[in-house]
Image (cartoon, helix red, strand yellow):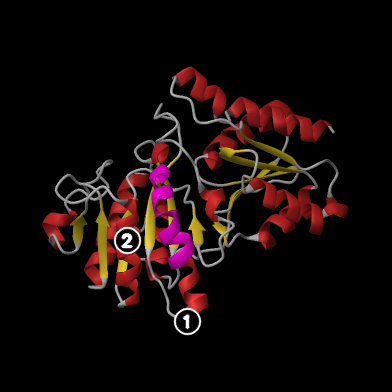
Amino acid sequence: MTYIEAISDALRIELRRDDRVFLIGEDIGAYGGAFKVTQGLQEEFGEWRVIDTPISETAIVGGCTGAALMGMRPVAEMQFADFVSCAWDQLVTVAAKQHWRAGTPIPIVVRLPSGGGFSGGPFHSQNPESSFAHIPGLKLVCPATPADAKGLLAAAIADPNPVLYFEHKHLYRRLKGGVPDSRYLTPIGEARLEREGSDVTVVTWGAMVHTAAEAAELLATELGASVEIIDLRSILPWDERMVLASVEKTSRVLVLHEDTLTGGFGGEIAATVAERAFEHLDAPIKRLAAPDTPVPFAPALEQEFLPQVEDVLASLRELLDY
């Protein structure tokens, strides 16, 4: 399946198996969604299971929270991850706090098409995961493969907590891989070893997993260096155990993400490694991310903005030469 087919397949399976599951968002019904993820689902399940809404992210997430309180399992779609800022109060002040305040689960999923690589500009290309990683009560997942796109979405829908599901738009139709036909859950909070290595560790997630993998192949050919790549899969919670074990083995670490550098979640990973694995390090922890600017429109500028394979190679060479 392609990445986008895996997401659609997971939604169809969950709608068929559990009457409490329903989808809600702008243009997700008759139109099939801005990216056609939900195409055909309203025809199969009807207008009350696949609900078209007005353009109000606040109303969508607020409605989901209320429905979850009444025992439903809503899955909301933001047409672009950038638009979730309109629903900040409902997510952060209400949904994320409800279980702590009253002991009631809030099993909602918010699908967030995120990321750049298609010249969408500053309002349709952001990776806002770090903004929410600071909020207790939320879970954040960022699948990098079709198999994880399906398994993590099923796990998110089954989870009793609000889950933000960051699906990378650049991977939708560019990435294809083996995906089981049946329903399965990919555990939230467990990283995946994308590539085993012994000389340097790359910790990353989302589309940057594939950028790192390409760089690792080139570095192996160029220097014979062995790069270990950890795909976090989720950043709240994140798999500290696997990261620390890898750093202990390789003694060098690059934290790579598409979000901007300052305040990006890579800083939390770097701080944890520095605090808990300092004596295993043979080089300073290095971070590679986008510069602290909005995402540019122009394709050439966007390419300069997003970390590229050449940037990863340069960072890895610097670590190995230290």
Residue lying farthest right?
279
Q: Is residue 200 left or right of residue 125?
A: right
- Dot 2 or dot 1, earlier in sequence: 2
Q: Nearer the viewer, mark 2 or mark 1?
A: 1
Front-most of 174 and 80? 80
User: Against 83, is 163 above or below?
Assistant: below
User: Is 93 part of what is drawn in magenta?
Assistant: yes
Where residue 145 sits: x, y (%)?
45, 48
The residue wearing badge 2 is 75
The residue wearing badge 1 is 103
- Amino acid, disc 2: Val
- Amino acid, disc 1: Gly
Point out the image quarter for the C terminus: top right
Residue lying farthest bottom?
103
Count residues near mark 1 (Cα–Cα under 10 Å), then give few for <14, some for 14-19, many for 20+.
few
Q: Residue at x 80, y 52 (%)?
A: 274
Where residue 247 sits: x, y (%)?
75, 51
Q: CA distance from mark 2 to mark 1?
A: 21 Å
| Residue 298, numbered label | none
Where residue 82 sits: x, y (%)?
42, 42
Q: Is residue 57 left or right of residue 147?
A: left
Front-most of 299 and 293? 293
User: Against 89, is 21 above or below?
Assistant: below
Q: Secondary structure at mark 1?
A: loop
Where residue 48 sits: x, y (%)?
16, 64
Q: Which residues are magenta?
A: 81-95
Residue 70 shows in the view: yes
User: Against 316, is 89 above or below?
Assistant: below
Q: Secondary structure at mark 2?
A: strand
Q: Is residue 173 left or right of residue 22?
A: right
Q: Is residue 258 left or right of residue 56?
A: right
Count residues near mark 2 (Cα–Cα under 10 Å), then give few for <14, some for 14-19, many for 20+.
many
